[in-house]
Image (tube, grey):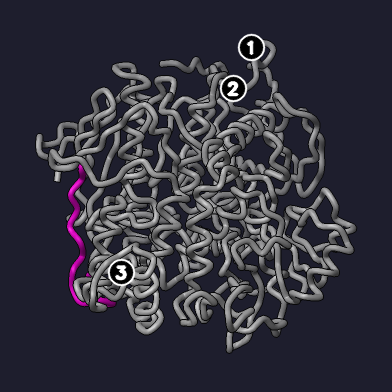
Amino acid sequence: MKHELLFGLAGALLLAPGVASATSGLPGGGHHNITITTHEGNDDLLSAGLGKTGLASAVAPAIANPLAPTAAELRRLNIWANYRALIDTTSNGGYGRLFGPNIDLDGNDTLGEGLIPGTEYRTSQHVRGVKSVTLLVQVPAHFNPEQPCIVAAPSSGSRGVYGAIGTTGEWSLKRGCAVAYTDKGTGAGGHELDTNIVTLPDGTLADARDARRSALFRAEISEPARQAYIAQHPNRYAMKHAHSQDNPERAWGDATLAGIEFAFDVLNRYHQPERGKHHRGKHAGYRPQNTLVIAASVSNGGGAVIAAAEADHRGLIDAVVAQEPQINVDMRRGVTVKRGGMPVPASGLPLYDYTTYANLVQPCAALAPSVADSPFVSFVVPAFGANRCAALVAAGEISGNTLIEQSENALAKLQAHGWEADSNLLHASHFGFAVSTAVSLTYANAFMRAPVTANLCGYSMGTTDAAGLPAAPAASPMPTLWSLNNGVPPSTGINLIAEGAANGPIREALAVSASTGLADYYWDGALCLRELLDEKRVRHSIAQTEVNGRLHGKPTLIVHGRADALVPVNHTSRPYLGLNSLAEGKRSQLSYIEVTNAQHFEAFLPFPGYDTRFIPLHYYGGVALDMMWKHLTEGAALPPSQVVRTTPRGGSPGAAPAITLGNLPPIQMHPASGDRIAAHRGTVSIPN
């Protein structure tokens, strides 16, 4: 075993009661204020007192005064929203039976509501020049100093600091590990420009002039510039990921490492064993040499833990578990991805490339007769989609003389750009929910480091009325924005506005493009976002985020759904396996698990058409964490790279039968030859 467990006494822990503030010399950093809160009784770390039942409820936790929620109320609402955003919380989907707060480490329903008391420590710091990175450490009351463990859990997507609580956080707290969360410099920080109100790190609000550097986010804008902007563009908002002018993704790995360092600092300051009659000398302190550290998260958080492992030159991290990681792979060394013996059409493209391409082509592809039964296909207006097809034909992007030919060609173009056919039925819902547009615009702003006043590519973010026109909301979204917003509008009533539309400014879905004179989902804006791919600043920003495949020999499990339409396997996990084989060769301890019938959005699984076709990848994320734990603590072998072939629930859309373990075969230690994934000198071979 690597870890010599030096702590001979568990004893009682020295916990700071109530709410306090302290200063901490973070390893490698300066002194930072820490907010300390204890959560016990009818409150807890995992669910803020809601428990298994409250987390599953579609009714949001109550707030006494909606105009001025307390920090405690906002935390509860935040945890409720983030937990439900990443997990299917229906019993038929497996919640409360296969996973959830009530399920113990052996998979049994023994934990009741699953409340986990303990203490939280929150601070913020600059990381590689990225302003206001939030770090939060949860230490459960049953943390065992004789077997200390830390799990780093950077947030998924652009979510705030609790963005991984329902995935990594739950697993870790049940294990008794301290959890090191970070928002990675993103999160739901908003600046309401009309009122000059901003979000604070605990979700409460303040005037931007008073908050200054204590704000979670405030737009870098002078008072005259703000006044001039809102005079022309009232009811607009700046959002942290899009408008911080930081390109925070370049520091996601370092932010994850900073969270681990903060966790060590917290444990050494507040959780040393008491010195009693059995004390054996000066306590050695928690160090990487005697504390087990796993970095594990989902999506953007999955990308962050891989980046952290690559940047970990001090040996902080022992192992990595990444689920559906969003990573920009450095393809210059020559990686080839094959499926069924044939090279895939495209691989290793960066997020900004494939997302802006999806945003351009998906509304046309959604009309293809071959995917007419796609979930939420009705969310794509046929006339608008047909107009987008016409614009694509005129631009030479697709071909066809009829709408059927054009839409089917658009669908084929998506596959040629690297999406698997397994994702075909998901393009309509991804565009219909504005996922592709929202991600494209947020990253365009971040990569260009554009100020909110730039209205990049003719877009802004603001509240709108029923006709889609900019308008003051009945109630400002700001009081609960920190809790409910996902960090990437449209969200919580803040929509994307097409400033440059012929009928604008108007909500972008209703925009008439000036170049076409048609309502075509704002072709002009989508094309502009796509063309920014060739901008020098965007290319430089993407290069700053690239991963290199060097994991320093750390045991690593990557789990990804083959049908993922948001983070396609051909551009992320598959080529990363090849890059790692070039970088580490026989020293590599990376295994890649590709799961069929699994996609990116677990919260969509209860919806008709999703329920019958797709299984919860979250289940396999938990299995991978269990396997890694046994590898680190018992020396158990890790599974080889493989395809896990699941069975969808079937039935009628909206009424799929309850999922069982029969739908979810185990990850095999000795997979059949037809399921093995191989990587050798940069070539990755995926079985059909």
- In the picture as drawn, the residue positioned furthest to the top comes out as 281
Question: Of the numbered discs in the image, which one, if any, rests on residue 128?
Answer: none
Between tags 2 and 3, which lies in front?
A: 3
Quadrant assignment for the N terminus: top left
Q: Is residue 206 left or right of residue 352?
A: right
Q: Mark 2 points at which residue?
A: 9
Above or below 624: residue 225? below
Q: Earlier in the sequence, mark 1 or mark 2?
A: 2
* Dot 1: element: loop
Q: State the residue in front, 375 or 668.
A: 375
Measured as percent of width and height from the top left, residue 306 is found at 46, 34
Q: Disc 1 and disc 2: Cα gap in Å?
A: 9 Å
Q: In this view, does 680 lie to the left or right of 626?
A: left
Measured in 3D between alpha carbons, the distance from the residue under mark 2 to the one under mark 3, in whole angstroms, is 63 Å
User: What's the magenta region?
Assistant: 643-657
Q: Residue at x 37, y 68 (%)?
A: 392
| Residues at discs 1 and 2 in contact (Cβ within 8 Å) | yes
Q: Which of marks 3 and 1 is nearer the N terminus?
A: 1
Mark 1 crowdedness (10 Å alpha carbons): few <14, some 14-19, many ≥20:
few
Q: Considering only vertical position in the picture, is 415 above or below 462?
A: above
Which of the pair 176/448 is nearer the observer? Answer: 448
Mark 3 — residue? 365
C-alpha span from label 3 to label 1: 69 Å
Q: Where is residue 490 in the image (x, y as percent from the top left)?
A: 56, 69
Q: What residue type is labelled 3?
A: Ala
Q: In this rendering, which labeled residue sits more in front, label 3 or label 1?
A: 3
Looking at the rendered structure, the kind of residue marked 1 is: Arg
Q: Tell me the SS state at disc 2.
A: loop
| Marks 3 and 1 in Cβ contact (< 8 Å) | no
Residue 577, x across and y down, in percent: 32, 32
Name the residue that disc number 1 marks.
280
